[in-house]
Structures are given as C-alpha cells and as structure tokens.
Amino acid sequence: MAGQPVQVLAVVGSLNPTSVTRTVILHAAERLRSDGCSVDVLDLEKDSLPLYNPDTAYDAPGFDQLQGRVERADVYVLGTPDYHGSISSAMKNFLDHFWREFAGKLFATIVASHEKGLTVTDQLRTVARQCYAWTLPYGVSFADEEDVRDGQVSSEALRKRLEMFVRDVRTYGALLARQRRADLEGAEPCPGAAGELLAAEWNHFSFDQKGYRVMGGQRGLKSAATNHKDTLYIRAPQRRLTGANGENGNRKTGRSG
C-alpha cells in the first residue's frame, strides 16, 4: 500500500439540487484530497440510477462503469439526509446495487439531520455489517442553518468534526486497504474475502427453474438480506445475495438535506 493513495468514493445521497448534504460531502472530499487521498464523487442527483431490479440492474446502461468506480474504492464516504429517521431512497437504491464490492472496506457516514441522525447512522452500519464491511465507530451529523449556510460549512463545531473524520478516513482507510490486500493474498478466512469465498464455492451450488437456490449456511456465511441467519438466497445470473428485508424503519420525522 506504500505510495498508493487511499481511494475514496464519496456518495451524495440527496436528489435536492441545493442539498446541504452535497455541501458537506464536497467539503470533506476537498479536505481528503488535500490530505493525499484520491477522491471520486458520485452525485446521485447527476449520476442517477434506475430503481433497483435484480433481473435488469446489472445490464443497465452505465452500470459497468459505475461498478468499476465502486470496486476501485477503499473507503465509502456516504452522505444522506435523514428522511423520517431513515436513509434517503437514493442512497438505499445505490446500496442495493452492490455487495461483494463493499466487503472488507470502510464505510464512513455523514447525515444531515435535526434529530442527530442516530437511526440513519445505525442503518448504514447495518448495511456495512451485512456486506462484510467495516465502519468508523462514529458518524458525523449536522443540521442546516446551524452548521451549513449559503453553500458553505459555517460552524466551527462541524469543521472540527470533519477534521477528525477526514483524519480517520485517511488513516484507517489506508490500514484496512493494506490488510484487505494481504488477506486476499492469504488463505485465512477474512471479511474482505467474503465475496471471493462465495464465488469460489459457486460451482457447488445448484439452482431451480427460476435461478434461485436456498442452501444451509456455508462456512458460517449468513444471509445479507434475510432473517434466516444461516440461509443464503442467491440469484444465479447475477451471483448476488437477495431477499426480503424484514425490518421496519423508525417513523420519527427527520428533516430534508
């Protein structure tokens, strides 16, 4: 990893053209670049994704290019507004498109919220855990008018939180990227190899007429999308974990970002 900059994909999960989420993500992206990271900003208001459909998503125009951007990243800086105590639909749709690409990498979260964004941060951590990714032990939250005004980060408190955030993304992103590469070259089980492990076992699976096969736990792997802890639901053409999410979101009303 020596000499290689940390590759960061910073995702703007708001479709609002005047989004304060975008303001803070762009601020963090510039600070990361100044600290030597390579930052790719994915703005879902400009680079829109069709609604996720496992039967068509991977053949959609532009998906291969987007997948390459996601695959190259060592760290995902995820920015989303708090909508009713939940992540934005744009962010959820982005996350639904990927799994293996996230394994063994770092999620770092930024939430625009007047309710501290705690449930939103927890939801993003849940996605990371289910995709065998790591997360920072905290998230950054902020409120418009209080922390962001006229398209700029305006509060000293938010600036200081973002300084710590940028430092941790750079430091732990580099550590995890280096370890992930070493893990993938080794033989020991590790989170970063979860996707590769699934692919390696692929030839042992059989499928029904619809391309689905339900199997008991394989080497301790757990479903990324179901409440059945030791069951894998796999769609053959895409080779991805799919299933119904049985959890209901918190209905506390948040503020748009």
Image: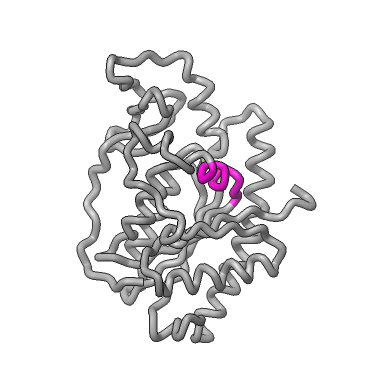
Q: Which region is colored magenta?
A: 65-74
- Residue pictured at 66% horizontal, 52% vertical: 175
Q: Is residue 104 visible?
A: no
The colour scheme applied to this rendered structure is: one colour
In the picture as drawn, the residue positioned furthest to the front comes out as 61
**Residue 211 pos. (x, y %):** 33, 20
Identify which residue, 190 or 224, lies in the foreground.
224
Magenta stretch contains residue 73: yes
Name above or below for residue 48 compared with residue 162.
above
Location of residue 141 by image quarter? bottom left
Identify which residue, 118 or 43, lies in the foreground.
43
**Residue 117 pos. (x, y %):** 36, 68
- Residue pictured at 51% horizontal, 50% vertical: 134
> How many numbered tags mark residues here?
0
Identify which residue, 161 or 203, lies in the foreground.
203
Name above or below for residue 243 compared with residue 167.
above
Magenta stretch contains residue 122: no
- Residue pictured at 53% horizontal, 86% vertical: 156
Q: Is residue 163 left or right of residue 1?
A: left
- Residue pictured at 32% horizontal, 46% vertical: 51
Quick one: quadrant of the C terminus? bottom left
Location of residue 241 by image quarter? top left
**Residue 34 pos. (x, y %):** 69, 69
Q: Majority secondary structure of the magenta segment?
A: helix
Location of residue 229 by image quarter? top left
In the picture as drawn, the residue positioned furthest to the right comes out as 3
**Residue 99 pos. (x, y %):** 45, 40
Q: Can residue 92 be seen in this view?
A: yes
Q: In this view, does 227 lie to the left or right of 157?
A: left
Name above or below for residue 148 compared with residue 96.
below
